[in-house]
Amino acid sequence: MNENSGHVAVHADQDVTFWEFVLPSNVTSCEEQVEEMVGRCETLFETFEDFVVPTEINYHVHLFPSGQQLPVAMSDDEHVNTIGRELRNASGITAIDFRESARVEVSESRWIPRIGFDGTEVAVQLSDSTVAVSRRNRTVEYRSGEPTGNEPTRDPWS
Amino acid sequence: MLHGPKTAQFDIDAEYVTTIVVSPLSDIWFEDTEIGLVNRRSLASFLERIEDAFSVATIERTSEWVPVEDLEAIY
């Protein structure tokens, strides 16, 4: 157990530890998939409250011809293009920013298989007070119980 | 948040699943102190809000650096 005194000890090792909430999805087309994915993401924003502030969100929008049915793969002949989205806002990305970013100015079907909340500020109680911690604020990277001396590459929560 | 074909491990009546993955990357959530308890409660409330906000079919817990029971104890 690493010491969390005045800072949050973040693991350097890419260990696999997570809760996974599994939701059924009955979509059949790319249009439905994107609408559901973006809608579910917006709902996820509502769960953050004052605990999580997303500061970095990354994802790709894959484009297919109109009416594209699922499943699809990037190797499909039908695959037209991929647009990368990298949202950055140190004071917090809003659900509105996110929905706006998912729009593309072309008529093809969009497909978004993954949305990564790769930067988050988390409200954590430390010895003195509740602070918004992130890999840039009040975190120290540890490996095998010792600080690594490196800047943390991950936030306390992802 | 991920979307993909349902795998055989899930007994779910749908072709696809959306998965919301929450990874704790620090011991602070598991610390056996008063501060640890406060932080566990905040994390548990957040996980509860996720479950309440969606029609969750199942919650999977996977852990390599703390016993999976420690995850179950939080949520």
Image (tube, coloured by chain):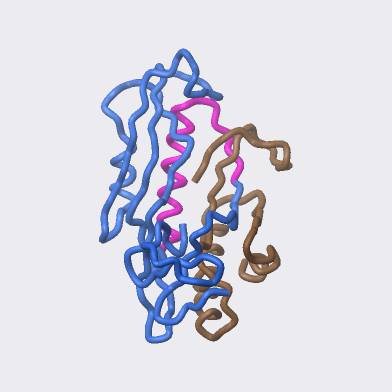
Chain colours: A blue, B brown
Left or right: A68 in relation to A130: right
Classify residue A120 by image quadrant.
bottom left
Q: Residue at x 33, y 30 (%)?
A: A83
Vertical side of A126 occupied by A22: above or below: above
| Extreme-top residue of the structure | A77
Q: A49 or A5: nearer the eye?
A: A5
The number of numbered discs placed on residues in the rendered structure image is: 0
Q: From the top left corner, tell me how far across and down residue A25 is, in percent.
A: 58, 38
Magenta span has A30? yes
Q: Residue at x 47, y 40 (%)?
A: A114
Prevailing secondary structure class for the magenta stretch in the rendered image: helix
Q: Which residues are magenta?
A: A23-48
Q: Residue at x 60, y 81 (%)?
A: B32
Magenta span has A1? no
Q: A23 or A128: nearer the eye?
A: A128
Q: From the top left corner, tell me how far across and down residue A121 is, in percent.
A: 37, 64
Left or right: A27 in relation to A115: right
| Figure quadrant of the C terminus of chain B | bottom right
Q: From the top left corner, tell me how far across and down residue A58 is, in percent.
A: 37, 44
Classify residue A51 by image quadrant.
bottom left
Left or right: A5 in relation to A87: right
Q: Residue at x 44, y 28 (%)?
A: A31
Q: From the top left corner, tell me how far across and down residue A81 is, in percent.
A: 36, 22
